[in-house]
């Protein structure tokens, strides 16, 4: 199939549909005076058009440049997303019979480059451009003109990097009219490169495709644009803060943008240098990355010295948004603010010391590999600090499941999966096994999809009233968020499973036994695509037809005293522009207090009571566990007499600790019932469904019975199997009953406070 | 939401358990059906279009430059490859070889009978005007073969899915109509 025409048609159709939705919603919008809906006349006159174009191409206002960045990034996301959908379509069948193998190679190359360089960073720069000056109480960015230049370098760099596609379409268009000749050879020659986004040498040097040169130049230009933006952010945050904004009360999102900008300052110039060296190797006969005179591995070192910090350059702003938005819908201040800032800075520094973990299979010295393994595992610590603080912020909070909050909570889950699979990859033996498989693709997509776009969309919903003065369709937003999360987990979960079966990535062909996995992943990818279109529809439609806001406190942030500076600015603006009076809630409470259930939890602040409480709770749980396990044993004994439970399965338990015999196994079973399961109940009883405690105990026992049924199953079939399941369930209910009643009795008798 | 409805207090959480199924459940199943339908529809539809429009079965060959071909010509460790002169190639092969040599990217489609396909699959050394070049198949461009039922099933799935997605607004309209009818009868 002709990829170029198909891709540009899809992209063009999406853009036309966007324009149509925008036009239709504008047409049906209410008049500003609140009167009847009016048919809008199509009054595009040349003068207005000219004025608008001149205004938007010459603006130096940080908010307008922010919007330009966001629009550009969204366009790039649609383009890169179309690549992804086409790639997934190819993988519906084991043979490369929809696109050719060359097209497939070009698709994954273009997808990676577009998403990483032209989607993520521009969108985050857009959000930061709009909100950082508002959050630090600055009038504008430190260098407004530099800001504009930084943005306007991006469209040509995208065009350079991805020019192969439009060139190909123009060539085919000329062919239709039978136009030939050397003058137009350019259009029949350029094709999208087939290298992978890492541009590994020697392939990137040997590739005869001239588009590779333009791609290198485009990436170099985007690097310059990004570095300019980063310098501007650093200077703005350092020197343009308002009178009342010190380092100690800088918002968490601003801290993250500052760290990200620092990373950019060190990483992107290096990429620029490496790209120039590559360009020289391709065109001027130098031998930096050629085995005769240079070393292809040198490219990998230089590239990944940029590439791994790049991972954090795109992750940290997302983490900043999470730390910023999550507390607003949990009704409490970010737990461990200082530690979250320190973890951000630690990630920033450590990210420059892990690059060689991408190169464990290149045969570098094992001692060097080991040191990079250690640092790669160590970087999980600051990331985990963030995760624990996010979870603790939600803990017992007054959670409101709005679309941004659903995305925040889901992101924590997907980020944990992405992170944990990454820690496995950081260990050399596992990496050698899974290098170049779908496991790697699944792992990093759980990060790059599972938190980055999730947080972008969460931010778009959270700040939509500020950006447009209107509210989006909340039901659609919630639905879209759930769909996005579901699609992502389905797609990238399937990729991880395929990777665990060691299916190599970047191949258009695959063995037929993987077809089901690939099809599930493709359906998941289509769900992601549909959810993105729904988001786009909501954003465009609501721009004209959303409910206008009449208070700046749309999210009830004043109730918990989290009405941050950007909302205060918005409130002033509403008052100045529309005469809308600021509102005050009837009651307020601080977002951080020591009262349980209101402010941040008092973890580790009350060490003394904890020391006296924990042993008593543990003893109560242990005793409850003993009673429960004894009751459970009675039921299991009855089941043994009836022949549906095999006591021999206890001996398998004994083998786990290197011993033998039913008696030893039973004692272990008893110990487990008194310790592991009983203590877990003590910890989680508060959060399990059902009141009073006896119901909680039964619910808990029902949940854990599944594990027991699987572990102690000894091949029962038919009716015997049914009886086995029933007895296991009854036995566990007895356990839950005994555990809960005893625990409750002892806790109240010993007057242990929760 | 109507355009002139304004919030003067924080956005309320007004979801009830009963409405969740229709508001989120039905469109969710609908979207799932659309996604599955797109996959099936594309495969089924393209299989028909591909054979009708002759979009497959012309493999692409790649011809390396003389310098790059050196590693296959001079290296004794590489497997023995079939050697041909240009004159020995079939007409379609010869045409494709010539086009690939001329093309800056070194690729061209073999349009016609591909007599030495198996040899090209392994890689061949072709001599033209005293210069030896390595050539091989870079893409087979095989034809898609699927069950003919896939296309109609995909379309039906998409239509059902759209119905599911539109359930919430349709249900809202139904309720509004009932409410209006109730007011009228009173």
Image: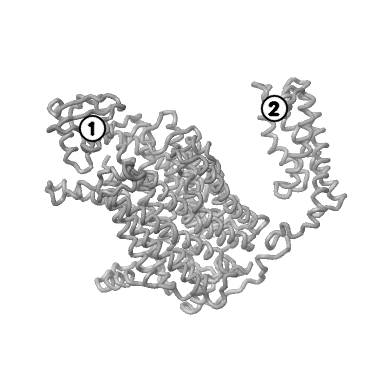
Disc 1 marks which residue?
B135
Asked whether A741 or B163 is in front, the reply is A741
Instruction: Between residue B104 and residue A675, name the one nearer to us.
Output: B104
Q: Which residue is mark 2?
A: A712
Is B58 rendered above or below residue A300?
above
Task: Identify the residue at horizontal 69%, vertical 62% (top origin).
Answer: A598
Residue found 73% across the figure and 47% down from its top: A683
Residue A519 percent coordinates (x, y): 43, 36
What is the secondary structure assignment of the residue under circle 2?
Answer: loop
Answer whether labels 1 and 2 touch (C-beta < 8 Å): no
B80 or B28: nearer the viewer:
B80
How many C-alpha atoms fall within 10 Å of the one at disc 2: few (<14), some, or many (≥20)?
some
Label 2 marks a residue whose chain is A
Residue B170 horizontal/vertical position (percent): 46, 51
Q: Position of residue A111 (x, y in %)?
A: 37, 48
Residue at point 29% right, 73% down? A51
Question: How far is mark 1 from mark 2, CA to CA?
Answer: 61 Å
Quadrant in the picture for residue A553 = bottom right
- Answer yes or no: is residue A547 visible: yes
Seen in the picture, residue A198 relative to A265 is either above or below; the reply is above
**Residue drawn at the location 12% of the way across and 27% of the way down:** B87
Give the residue at the far right of this rendering: A749
> Which label sits in the foreground, 1 or 2?
1
Instruction: Locate the C terminus of chain B by quadrant.
Output: bottom right
Is residue B173 visible in the rendered structure shown here?
no
């Amino acid at each position: 199939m002709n990829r170029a025409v198909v891709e540009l048609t899809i992209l063009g159709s999406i853009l036309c549909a966007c324009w149509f939705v925008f036009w239709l919603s504008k047409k049906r919008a209410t008049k500003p005076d609140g009167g009847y809906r009016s048919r809008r006349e199509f009054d595009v006159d040349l003068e207005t058009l000219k004025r608008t174009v001149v205004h938007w191409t010459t603006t130096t206002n940080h908010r307008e440049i922010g919007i330009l960045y966001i629009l550009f990034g969204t366009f790039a996301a649609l383009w890169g997303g179309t690549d992804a959908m086409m790639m997934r379509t190819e993988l519906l069948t084991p043979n490369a019979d929809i696109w050719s193998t060359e097209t497939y190679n070009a698709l994954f190359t273009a997808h990676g480059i577009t998403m990483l360089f032209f989607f993520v960073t521009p969108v985050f720069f857009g959000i930061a451009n709009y909100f950082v000056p508002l959050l630090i109480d600055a009038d504008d960015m430190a260098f407004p003109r530099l800001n504009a230049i930084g943005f306007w370098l991006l469209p040509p760099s995208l065009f350079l990097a991805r020019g192969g596609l439009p060139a190909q379409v123009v060539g085919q268009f000329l062919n239709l009219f039978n136009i030939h000749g050397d003058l137009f050879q350019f259009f029949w020659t350029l094709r999208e490169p087939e290298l992978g986004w890492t541009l590994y040498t020697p392939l990137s040097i040997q590739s005869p495709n001239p588009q590779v040169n333009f791609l290198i130049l485009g990436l170099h230009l985007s690097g310059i644009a990004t570095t300019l933006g980063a310098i501007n952010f650093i200077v703005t945050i350092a020197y343009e803060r308002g009178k009342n904004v010190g380092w100690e009360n800088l918002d968490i999102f601003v801290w993250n943008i500052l760290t990200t900008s620092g990373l950019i300052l060190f990483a992107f110039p290096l990429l620029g240098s490496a790209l120039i060296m590559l360009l020289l190797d391709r065109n001027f006969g130098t031998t930096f990355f050629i085995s005769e005179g240079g070393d292809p591995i040198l490219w990998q070192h230089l590239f990944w010295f940029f590439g791994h910090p790049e991972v954090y350059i795109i992750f940290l702003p997302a983490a900043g948004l999470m730390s910023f938005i999550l507390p607003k819908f949990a009704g409490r201040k970010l737990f461990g603010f200082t530690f979250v800032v320190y973890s951000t800075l630690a990630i920033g520094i450590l990210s420059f010391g892990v690059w060689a973990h991408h190169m464990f299979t290149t045969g570098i010295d094992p001692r060097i590999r080991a040191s990079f393994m250690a640092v790669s595992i160590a970087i999980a610590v600051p990331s985990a600090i963030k995760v624990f603080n996010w979870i603790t912020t939600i803990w017992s909070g007054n959670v409101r499941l709005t679309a941004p909050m659903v995305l925040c909570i889901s992101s924590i889950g997907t980020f944990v999966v992405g992170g944990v699979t990454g820690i496995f990859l950081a260990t050399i033996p596992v990496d050698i096994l899974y290098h170049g498989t779908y496991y790697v693709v699944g792992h990093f997509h759980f990060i790059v999809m599972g938190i980055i776009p999730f947080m972008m969309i969460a931010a778009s919903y959270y700040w939509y009233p500020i950006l447009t003065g209107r509210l989006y369709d909340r039901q659609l937003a919630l639905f879209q968020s759930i769909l996005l999360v579901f699609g992502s987990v389905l797609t990238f979960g399937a990729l991880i499973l395929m990777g665990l079966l060691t299916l190599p990535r970047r191949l258009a062909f695959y063995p037929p036994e993987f077809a089901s996995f690939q099809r599930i992943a493709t359906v998941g990818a289509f769900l992601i695509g549909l959810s993105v279109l729904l988001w786009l529809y909501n954003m465009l439609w609501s721009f004209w037809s959303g409910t206008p806001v009449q208070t700046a406190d749309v999210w009830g942030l004043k109730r918990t005293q989290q009405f941050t500076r950007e909302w205060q600015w918005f409130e002033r603006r509403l008052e100045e522009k529309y005469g809308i009076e600021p509102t005050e809630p009837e009651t307020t409470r601080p977002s951080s207090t020591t009262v349980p259930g209101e402010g941040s939890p008092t973890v580790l602040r009350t060490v003394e009571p904890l020391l006296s409480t924990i042993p008593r709770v543990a003893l109560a749980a242990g005793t409850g566990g003993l009673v429960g396990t004894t009751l459970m044993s009675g039921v299991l004994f009855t089941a043994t007499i009836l022949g549906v439970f095999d006591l021999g399965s206890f001996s398998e338990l004994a083998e786990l600790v290197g011993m033998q015999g039913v008696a030893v196994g039973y004692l272990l079973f008893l110990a487990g019932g008194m310790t592991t399961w009983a203590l877990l109940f003590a910890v989680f009883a508060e959060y399990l469904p059902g009141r009073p405690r006896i119901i909680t105990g039964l619910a808990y026992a029902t949940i854990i019975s599944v594990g027991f049924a699987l572990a102690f199953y000894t091949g029962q079939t038919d009716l015997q199997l049914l009886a086995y399941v029933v007895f296991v369930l009854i036995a566990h209910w007895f356990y839950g009953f005994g555990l809960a009643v005893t625990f409750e009795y002892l806790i109240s008798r010993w007057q242990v406070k929760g | 939401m109507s355009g002139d409805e304004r919030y003067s207090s924080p956005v309320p959480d007004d979801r009830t358990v009963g409405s969740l199924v229709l508001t989120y459940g039905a469109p969710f199943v609908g979207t799932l059906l659309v996604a599955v339908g797109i996959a099936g529809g594309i495969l089924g539809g393209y299989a028909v279009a591909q054979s009708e429009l002759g979009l497959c079965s012309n493999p692409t060959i790649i011809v390396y430059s003389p310098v790059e071909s050196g590693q296959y010509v001079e290296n004794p460790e590489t497997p023995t490859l079939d050697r041909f002169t240009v004159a020995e190639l079939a007409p379609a092969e010869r045409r494709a070889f010539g086009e690939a040599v001329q093309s800056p990217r070194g690729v061209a489609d073999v349009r016609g009978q591909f007599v030495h396909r198996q040899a090209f699959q392994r890689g061949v050394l072709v001599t033209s005007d005293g210069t030896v070049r390595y050539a091989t198949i870079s893409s087979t461009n095989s034809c898609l073969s699927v069950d003919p039922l896939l296309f109609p099933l995909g379309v039906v799935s998409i239509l059902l899915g759209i119905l599911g997605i539109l359930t919430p607004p349709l249900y809202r309209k139904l309720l509004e109509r009932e409410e209006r009818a109730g007011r009228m009868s009173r």
